Image (cartoon, grey):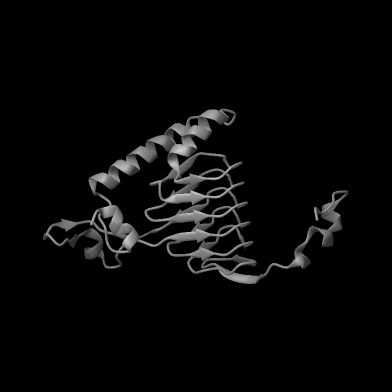
Amino acid sequence: MREEEKIFAGVLFSPDDPELRAIKLRTHNLCSKYNRTFEDETGKREELIRKIFCEFGENGFLQGPIYIHYGKHTKIGAHFYANFNLTIQDDTWVTIGDHCNFGPNVTIVTPVHPMLPHERRALMDKHGVAKHMIYAKSVEIGNDCWLGANVVVCSGVTIGDNCVIGAGSVVVRDIPSNSFAAGNPCRVIREITEADSMVNKPEILGDNRIIK
């Protein structure tokens, strides 16, 4: 079994495997190129984004700089917006739905390291060779989610549709749809309902209107 196949099987793999290192090097270099572009170089940015990610939907915008690990393991839906310093460590699958908005410094991580220090340093493979090994758990974020500044989404987490994650949160467990959640560790504060509509905040809505 190839090391990338081990990733998706959910078992230990060697991140130092030459094939995996080549994937990461390519993506890191593409990110470096993206980070050297100007914001109005839309054609160049679009071309680089298509090379970085497995899927990237229409009308997306990455403010940059961006820091993506594999890229080919990340699927992003349409109408996505990410502010400064988006980081995705996608050793395994990261899936982001449509109409999601990320504040500055959002980080998504999928790899997991052994807890014991001597196991973090090295484990023995089936051939008796000592290697640095990790495993990874996928992350899934639904549609219409807003992640505030400095949110960290940890490995194995699923965030449902229509969620708001408060700034500075560290998400270590699943968040159900239609939730406002915040904190470290992140927890559900309450359900998001029609009572949260801007129509109930006329002092903020001003002379604008809700789209039905």
Count every numbered label the image shows and give the total: 0
Please say whether residue 38 is visible from this viewpoint: no
57 and 88: which one is in front?
A: 57
Residue lying furthest left in this view?
Answer: 128
Residue 186, image x, y percentages: 54, 67
The quarter of the displayed image where residue 59 is located: top right
Residue 182, image x, y percentages: 59, 65
Please tell me whether residue 7 is drawn above or below residue 37 in the rendered image. below
Please tell me whether residue 119 is drawn above or below residue 92 in the rendered image. below
Q: In which quarter of the image is the C terminus?
A: bottom right
Please tell me whether residue 187 is drawn above or below residue 63 in the rendered image. below
In this rendering, would 78 be left or right of 55? right
Residue 1, image x, y percentages: 23, 57
206 and 27: which one is in front?
A: 27
Image point (25%, 54%), residue name: 14
Please say whether residue 208 is visible from this viewpoint: yes
Image point (47%, 48%), residue name: 87
Residue lying furthest right in this view?
Answer: 207
Residue 71, image x, y percentages: 42, 45
Image point (38%, 40%), residue name: 27
